[in-house]
Image (cartoon, rainbow, N blue to C red):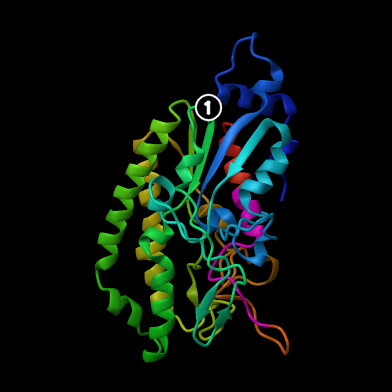
Amino acid sequence: MPRFRKKLAGAAAAAALCLLGAGTSSTPASAAQSLRWVALGDSYTAGAIPAAGHTFEEPRDGCQRTTESYPEVIKRDLGSLVRLHNVSCGNATIANVDREEQHPIGYELHIPGLVDNHDPDYPFPPVPPQIDAVSPGTGLVTVGVGGNSLGFGEILGKCIELGPEGGVGSSPCKDHYGNSLAARLEHVRAEYDRMLTAIHAKAPSAKVVTVGYPTVIPDNVSNCLYGNPLQFSTIRHADLNWLRASALEPLNAVIQQVTAAHGDHYVDIYSSSKGHSVCALGQEKWVEGILERLPTPGNPAVWALVHPNARGHANAAARVENAILGG
């Protein structure tokens, strides 16, 4: 995917100058080209899975930040224009961003019948609230979070569990949750509003860019094979439609609405990733399924739990970088 480094270097530098509020000739060029950027978020920001690159931090803190996650891709693209402090963390909630410490899990994961991973470094020490990395000198904050506050991973697990109980055309997961998603979404709305208020209080001059979630479930779920763990395992088609229409799309809408209310910039990843869901084939697949790889003799299954791969992060990087540069 083309990178925005192909833009004129002068245009990029000018955008960085504007973000820094460095419009006077007395500002040294070297300072103007080093935008202090803090990346906040959950696993869709951190990367978290092998398909999104290698974890790179030593010693490990269990947050599973990977080399091909979109903050790291943008950092390489923009080079000396930015100084990135990436504190995103797999499994983070909105509360873990703005006020609560988090206990990272690394790749410790147990899903009966699918995944049984033990991380030799688990348990990890708690990490502080991500907002601690934000200061008055921060010029840019990007944040991609909300899915765990909605409970999307928990809902996926329950849908997998309940799928075999239903027949073709049934929606056992939707029946189980009823109308409870509406209250969950309002919880996300209140939490997101509180978080953005806190970010602006800590960095009053920062540009704040929020990042939505990509297309995970296709519009046409007949492309998804029931029982395939490389896709959605045993989640029923009707439940996939329900998850898309009642959880994922409304979650993005809430994030966009709260962002607008704060006067911040929302990055839509969803539209640009249409056609690249979990159920797409080959290189068109930008989001991995429940598993990235099936087990083979001597090799365990590789879990992904519906997370973007490197291609998905490349798409996110292009959109977020455009927002950073003022596009």
Q: Residues within 10 Å of mark 1 (few under 14, many from 20)?
A: some
Q: Nearer the viewer, residue 73 or 103?
A: 103
Q: Nearer the viewer, residue 283 or 78?
A: 78
Q: Is residue 3 left or right of residue 326?
A: right
Residue depicted at x 43% and y 76%: 157
> Residue 226, how many percent across, how many down?
51, 84
Q: Is residue 272 visible?
A: yes
Residue depicted at x 64% and y 35%: 83
Q: Secondary structure at mark 1?
A: loop
> Residue 197, how many percent across, how many down?
35, 37
Residue depicted at x 72% and y 24%: 10
Q: Which residues are magenta?
A: 300-316
Q: Which residue is mark 1?
A: 137
Q: Tell me if residue 255 is in the magenta stretch.
A: no
Q: Quadrant location of residue 259?
A: top left
> Residue 289, how many percent across, how many down?
56, 73
Q: Tell me if residue 309 is in the magenta stretch.
A: yes
Q: Amino acid at mark 1?
A: Gly
Q: Is residue 167 left or right of residue 34?
A: left
